[in-house]
Amino acid sequence: MRGLSSKKTCSQRKKTLNWIFIKKPLIMISNIITISPEVQSGTPVFAGTRVPIKILFDYLKGGDTIDEFLNDFPSVKKEQVEQLLKLAENIVTLNLASNEKSAA
């Protein structure tokens, strides 16, 4: 698996992100995250809840499991957590492995 080449320009990276999120939407973000001034003063929350996204990451950094988070916040669905983590993975890795295979 190849990482980001330093030869790629900012424009090329932006095109890759556009491909991931616009041309081939992998995840419907609106099913995962809500950002609204009326809910928690605009803090990103899990859609349909008032649970800030950051709390999940605080739990994980603290060594808690996803199941422990879900037990403490039953309004959040396991699928939302899984999709959020997949979204984070796609953003951080630019999903290059699957993009390069499909472009070949």
Image: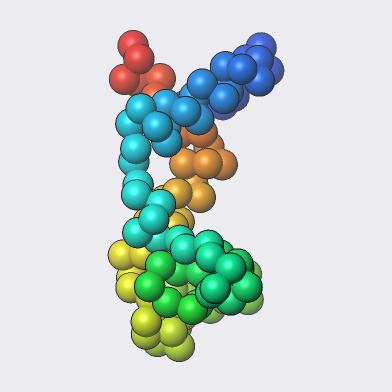
**Residue at 56% across, 42% down:** 92
**Residue at 37% across, 85% down:** 74
Indicate whether 2 appears above or below 70: above
Which residue occupies the foreground of this view, 69 or 73? 73
Residue 3, visible in the rendered structure: yes
Which residue occupies the foreground of this view, 31 or 82? 31
**Residue at 57% across, 25% down:** 14
Q: Position of residue 53 (x, y in %)?
A: 54, 68
Which residue occupies the foreground of this view, 38 or 30? 38
Q: Position of residue 58 (x, y in %)?
A: 62, 73
Q: Which residue is situated farthest in the front direction here?
A: 38
Q: Position of residue 47 (x, y in %)?
A: 40, 67
39 horizontally vs 23: left or right = right
**Residue at 42% across, 26% down:** 19
Q: Position of residue 95 (x, y in %)?
A: 45, 34
Indicate whether 70 appears above or below 15: below
Quadrant including the C terminus: top left
Residue 58, visible in the rendered structure: no
Looking at the rendered structure, the number of numbered marks drawn on it comes to 0
Indicate whether 7 appears above or below 81: above
Q: Which residue is situated farthest in the bottom direction here?
A: 72
104 horizontally vs 43: left or right = left
11 horizontally vs 90: left or right = right
**Residue 59 occupies quadrant:** bottom right
Which residue occupies the foreground of this view, 75 or 71? 75
| Coloration of the structure image | rainbow
